[in-house]
Image: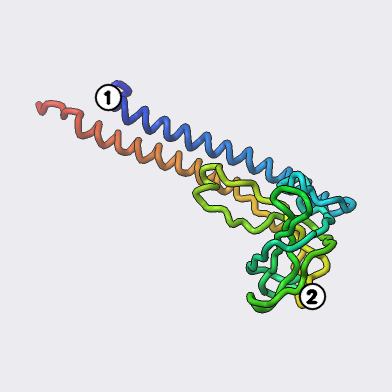
Amino acid sequence: MIRKLPLIPTIVVAAAILVMIGLGVWQLGRAGQKDAAVAAWRANISLPETAYPVANPADESLMFRRLAAHCLRVVSWQVVGGRSAQGQPGWRHIATCATGAEGPGLVVDMGVSQAPDAKVSWAGGLVRGHATHEPDQRAWLERLAGHASPLRLMIVAETAAPGLTPSAAPDPASVPNNHRAYMWQWFFFALVAAVIYALAVRKRLRETTPEPPQP
């Protein structure tokens, strides 16, 4: 039977199955890494306040830690959906600030309003709060290709700008860990590919095997 297997299709399907199994194993490793990261981020909540890492604003080791920074001036505003500290839906007003140093700057969530076009009269100053990622505006293709820039840390200000309500504090429990689900998906795809190919080969062998002569 092995000799009757089509060589090239068998190699292609076997390679695809191995790749899918490899991706499943990789996702399992990623799940473990995410679990370890979330555990470290939970511990960050109770650590003492430290300065915002202006030189390395994408330092994920400081996620969910209490940070302090000085916004020298507001360069731009961004409005995205979110929730207040009381759980009410609204519009988060996120400022990108200059800090007096060259680089990507400081990102601060200054609070929530009920209208997206609310005017915020805040020009900068000292901000304190816990860190999370800035809103992800990166293109999907860039992320898929691995060319997207890492997300910067954003301070969710404990004291909102005038006219705004403080945003909900970032919570490590909200960080998704879908890697185990992706692992089972890849293993399932590998199993389905193996079963489909086995059925196709079985059908072909039946069609190509000559029937025994009738007595």
Q: What is the x, y in percent for residue 179?
A: 60, 46
Image-based side of 80 in relation to 140, left or right: right
Numbered disc 1: secondary structure: helix
Picture quarter with the N terminus: top left
* Residue 24 appears in the picture as rendered: yes
Q: Secondary structure at mark 2?
A: loop
Residue 78's image quarter?
A: bottom right
Q: Residue extending furthest right?
A: 48
Q: Compared with residue 154, is residue 112 higher up or lower down, i.e. above or below?
A: below
Judge whether 119 appears above or below 104 on screen.
below
The answer to which quarter of the image holds residue 157 is bottom right
For mark 2, what is the residue?
A: 162
Display colour scheme: rainbow
Specify whether 144 is left or right of 102: left
Residue 32 position in % (x across, y down): 68, 41
Number of numbered tags placed on the structure image: 2
User: Where residue 169 sits in the image (x, y, percent)?
Assistant: 77, 63
For the residue pair 146 and 47, the one nearer the viewer reads as 146
Q: Disc 1 designates what residue?
A: 4
| Residue in the image at 80% along x and 58% along y | 130
Looking at the rendered image, the quarter that the C terminus falls into is top left
Name, please, the residue furthest toward the left.
215
Q: Which mark is residue 182?
A: none
Q: Which of 96 and 115 lies nearest the eye of the viewer?
A: 96
**From this viewpoint, is residue 172 visible?**
no
